[in-house]
Image: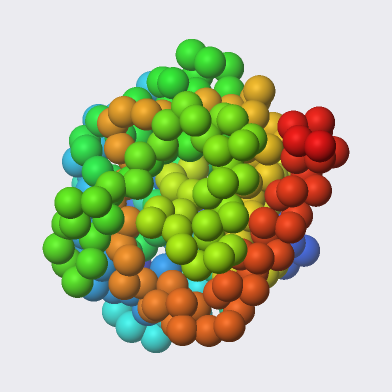
Amino acid sequence: MTPELAGFGHARTVSVAGALVAAVASEPHVWNSEVVVAVNVHDQAGPLARCLESIARQERPAGGLGVLVIDDGSSDDWAVTVGRFRQRLPLIVCRMQCGSPSRARNAALSFVDEAMRNARWVARLDADDCFSTVHSLAAACELGDRRHAHWVLGGNRLVRDGRLLERENPATDALLQPVDVLSVLRSMAEGTAGNELPSCNLLLRPRAGWRYPEVWSAEDHWLVADLLLNHAPSGAVLTDPLYCDYNLGGDVTAANRRSERYLASRQALFAQAQAWAVRQGHVR
């Protein structure tokens, strides 16, 4: 680990996708946390501070909170940012060479599966996003527990250039209706969607087996569409409060929107979603 993480200890070696990964923690009990917020970082030291601050302000969910920060080959001072929160957050930190958002997110899920056996929820929060309210995480966990769900999907506000937009992307119970999901996916494939699926706002049960597909763009939409169309009875939708403030200006997202792969991935997803819906008997 870097000198900036010298105050961390309680080290463990964890097997992730066949590789041994060294991880350190800010305190020993974090390994036993029941709710884990997974934050993947790649050269995002600036926004990471806002992300971690929003986690630090969260109402603590039942069972204890742990924050897993995975650095995916950063060259900036991300570790300095993390170190500043050592006294405020129960942190686990490790470094990997994942190479893509989907592999990094899957590595986080595998890490929790392997090393944090008490965890009952893994909550996603991108390094350039923040929780929308101080109650967002606890509300999502409480809903999932009450419904005995295996996944929870929330909604989000939208941020561009540091400014909160009036437009929101809420999660509604309509997302549990296949016809509504297909309608959103069709507009995404056509490039006309006002809002895409609110796929950045996801909680998963550890060891449920779900993973992000290795696609260049929209990997989170692929997973969420799978959950909504193939596993709706095992999930829950958090309609209030909103889960996170999603940054529309993320480097990967901005680059993807300028590429042919951006639409191609969404067109492929819509075709696959139609096949899923037919197989499940949702449409003919």
Q: Could you say which is closer to the camera, residue 91 or residue 261?
A: 261
Residue drawn at 28 percent across, 47 percent down: 168
Left or right: where does residue 196 sit relative to residue 264?
left
Which one is nearer the viewer's eye here, 12 or 248? 248
Q: Quadrant of the C terminus?
A: top right
Does residue 89 appear in the picture of this structure? no
Instruction: Please state which of residues 170 and 36 is positioned toward the viewer in this rendering.
Output: 170
Residue 115 in picture, x, y percent from top left:
61, 45
Percent across and percent down for residue 261 are 60, 79
Q: Is residue 175 left or right of residue 223?
A: left
The vertical placement of 42 against 201, above or below, is below
Considering every residue shown, the one lying at the far right of the view is 279
- Work out which quarter of the rendered image holds the N terminus and state it: bottom left
Disc tally is 0
Residue 182: image location, x then y, percent: 62, 45
Q: Residue furthest front?
A: 284
The quadrant holding residue 80 is bottom left
Q: Nearer the viewer, residue 62 or 106?
A: 106
**Residue at image location 59% in from the left, 63% down from the top:** 189
Q: Eyeballing the image, is 7 above or below 136?
A: below
- Residue located 46% across and 77% down the image: 257
**Residue name at image x 38 percent, y 56 percent:** 194
Q: What percent of the width, then of the height, locates residue 224? A: 59, 46
Residue 266 appearing in the image: yes
Relative to 30, is 148 above or below?
above
